[in-house]
Amino acid sequence: MVAKLFMIVVCVAAVAFYLRFLIALWKEPKRLPIGYWVRLRLTVATNEASEPQRRKSTLTRAA
């Protein structure tokens, strides 16, 4: 009986946490690819083909 009640409480808490996570994810603002549009606009303004810049060091970035 105690184990059954414990499992019910854990499942209800998990569902509540999951719903809260989904609502927070839904409310998060959308990120716009601004860098792409700026590079595209600069390419059109200078009439030159610009290549994407490479990262200097990807190993120094934290995981």
Image (tube, rainbow, N blue to C red):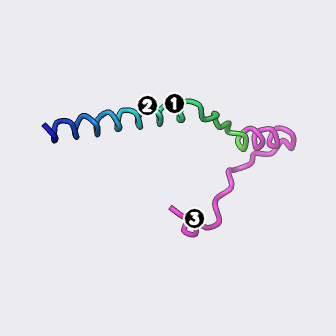
Query: Which secondary structure lies at badge 2?
Result: helix
Q: Residues within 10 Å of mark 1 (few under 14, many from 20)?
A: few
Q: Residues within 10 Å of mark 3 (few under 14, many from 20)?
A: few
Q: Nearer the viewer, mark 2 or mark 3?
A: 2
Q: Position of residue 32 (x, y in %)?
A: 68, 36
Residue 59 in the figure: left or right of residue 50: left
For the stretch drawn in magenta, what is the main secondary structure? loop
Q: Which residue is mark 2?
A: 19
Give the amino acid type for the residue marked by disc 1 in the picture.
Answer: Ile
Residue at figure coordinates x 84%, y 41% from the top left: 47
Mark 2 and mark 3 lie on one chain; the one further toward the N terminus is 2
Query: Which secondary structure lies at badge 3?
Result: loop
Give the amino acid type for the residue marked by disc 2 in the picture.
Answer: Leu
Residue range in magenta is 37-63
**Real-space CA distance between mark 1 and mark 2, rounded to the nearest whole angstrom:** 6 Å
Give the amino acid type for the residue marked by disc 3 in the picture.
Answer: Arg
Q: Which residue is mark 3?
A: 61
Q: Position of residue 27 (x, y in %)?
A: 59, 31
